[in-house]
Amino acid sequence: MEFMKGIFITFEGIEGSGKSTQTTLLCAALENLHYKVFRTHEPGGPPIAEEIRELLLNTKNKEMLPETELLLYSASRAQHTGEWILPALKDGKIVVCDRYYDSTFAYQGAARSLDMEFIRILTDFATYHTNPDLTFLLDLSVEEGRKRIKNRYPDRLESEKDEFHQCVRNQYLALAREYPERFVVLDGSLPKETIHNMVLTKVLDYIGAQCEL
Ligand code: TYD
């Protein structure tokens, strides 16, 4: 099934909140229902954006300044949005993206204390004013998130202190309050099948509402 204009769905949350799992489950369920789905993630996507991802996450880049970090996430997003996301949406696909610009407001804006107004302007530029239709925030305590990722080698941002991740979580919740029309906050500590059912129900409701327009 195709839409006149695609649907843009994003997943957000701290490390270990289950975004990738839910992205996988949602894409599989939608494909089973014969929707055209395009799965992707940030930072990264097309080759240029993946090279920027490597710079951003490499633990050897300890000297990276917050300003550089913000510009690199934004550069990666511009390439990703222009090269992959916009064409997929134009093609009527359901684009499901693991993290998008809300991550920048949470990590670089809140946790790195960079100017939110400037991030807003930069984000509009880097996304060609492309906004998600639905954003699922998988809310989880920092402690629980840490437990879940303890077996993987931490990247540059995962290596940050608990207060950093607490700041990220609080900012996500603040964003969800600010943009209730697109955010759906789910308890990330629930079983993955329960969360998946809630996500799928919401997405199918949204699609149904679009078809009635
Ligand atoms: P990734 O391995 O994709 O993380 P996860 O599996 O936890 O989603 O690494 C992405 C890291 O980049 C993660 O720590 C969050 C961070 N990030 C930002 O700081 N700003 C951003 O705009 C984005 C998209 C990610």
Image (tube, rainbow, N blue to C red):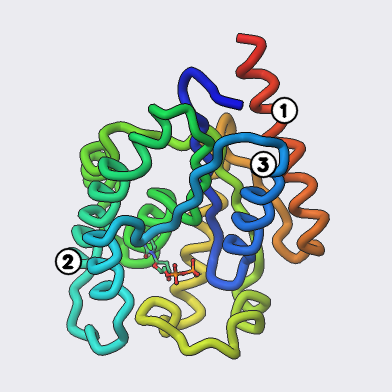
Instruction: Please identify the quadrant where the C terminus is shown.
Output: top right
Question: In this rendering, would 45 be left or right of 195?
Answer: left
Ligand 1 contact, mark 3 (Cβ < 8 Å): no
The residue lying at 53 percent from left, 55 percent from top is 12
Label 2 element class: helix
In percent of width and height, residue 116 lies at 30, 48
Crowding at mark 3 (Cα within 10 Å: few <14, some 14-19, many 20+): some
Crowding at mark 2 (Cα within 10 Å: few <14, some 14-19, many 20+): few
| Circle number at residue 205 | 1
The residue lying at 66 percent from left, 65 percent from top is 140
Comparing marks 3 and 2, which lies closer to the viewer? 3
Toward the viewer: 128 or 67? 128
In percent of width and height, residue 32 lies at 71, 43
Question: In this rendering, would 150 be left or right of 43?
Answer: right
The earlier-in-sequence mark between 3 and 1 is 3
| Circle number at residue 30 | 3
Q: CA distance from mark 3 to mark 1?
A: 13 Å
Comparing marks 2 and 1, which lies closer to the viewer? 1
Amino acid type at circle 2 is Thr
Residue occupied by mark 2: 68
Crowding at mark 1 (Cα within 10 Å: few <14, some 14-19, many 20+): few
Q: CA distance from mark 2 to mark 1?
A: 40 Å
In percent of width and height, residue 49 lies at 26, 60
Comparing marks 3 and 1, which lies closer to the viewer? 3
Ligand 1 contact, mark 2 (Cβ < 8 Å): no
- Circles 3 and 1: CB atoms closer than 8 Å: no
Q: CA distance from mark 3 to mark 2?
A: 37 Å
The earlier-in-sequence mark between 3 and 2 is 3
Where is residue 194, by image quadrant?
bottom right
The residue lying at 35 percent from left, 57 percent from top is 45
Instruction: Please identify the quadrant where the N terminus is shown.
Output: top right
